[in-house]
Amino acid sequence: MKLSVRRLTGEALTARLDDLARLRIEVFRDFPYLYDGDVAYERKYLSRYLAPEACLIAAFDGESVVGAATGTPMASEADYVTAPFRARGEDLEPIFYFGESVLQRRYRGQGVGVAFFDEREAHARALGRFRRAVFCGVVRQADHPARPADYVPLDDFWRRRGYFPIEGARTEFSWRDIGEAAESPKIMQYWGRTLP
């Protein structure tokens, strides 16, 4: 197994949209997201990372995509993403938003998550105007019936990277959980740090 991590742009990204869409669906089906997605929606969603200041970092085992992480200027995000920061009167322009990190289970614990953060932070710094990086994670109750007995939240990993929960910065994202007939809102907690 030879893992590599690299940024995808332009035609290289376009050529991998279906692979990336399937990867997001596969990884987000697991707890805590329990996402019941479809390739057409995911392909459309991922095409936004073709924008000049956005980034999509992919992890490869040989030529197979096994992970991905995204980022984009917060000011370009939808209202439901930016709402907590606008409500606090914050300027969105210096904030870079990390959309998600997904990695197939068998590749975890090998440094890819660290590389995803390093690459997105480097991308944001290279753009020259971003002073903060933020992301959000879903909040599920501790006794959720789908929570696996061996589930370990990523909170400690995020803290080691210098990210901490932003007090009062929560929003709702909606998606259809596995077994649901329709989308339902999920509470999302923002985490952030000043870019080094």
Image: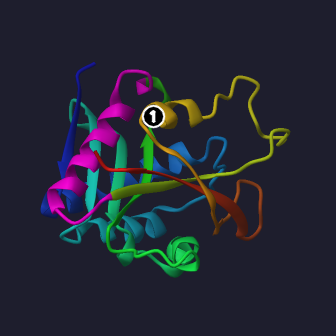
Q: Is residue 186 left or right of residue 156?
A: right
Q: Which residues are magenta?
A: 107-131
Q: Is residue 138 magenta?
A: no
Q: Is residue 3 left or right of residue 105?
A: left
The residue sitting at 56% across, 77% down in the picture is: 83
The residue sitting at 28% across, 48% down in the picture is: 121
* Closer to us: 94 or 146: 94
Image: 105 above or below 177: above
Q: Amino acid at mark 1?
A: Gln
Q: Which residue is the site of mark 1?
A: 104
Tell me if residue 19 can be seen: yes
The residue sitting at 51% across, 79% down in the picture is: 89
For the N terminus, the quadrant is top left
Q: Is residue 110 magenta?
A: yes
Which quadrant of the figure has residue 130? bottom left
Q: Position of residue 9 (x, y in %)?
A: 17, 59
Name the element at disc 1.
Answer: loop
Q: Position of residue 44 (x, y in %)?
A: 39, 71
The residue sitting at 16% across, 62% down in the picture is: 128
* Closer to us: 193 or 186: 193
Q: Position of residue 88 (x, y in %)?
A: 56, 74
Q: Position of residue 94 (x, y in %)?
A: 32, 68
For the C terminus, the quadrant is top left
* Closer to us: 78 or 44: 78
Tell me if residue 65 can be seen: no
Label 1 neighbour load within 10 Å: few <14, some 14-19, many 20+: some
Which quadrant of the figure has residue 155? top right
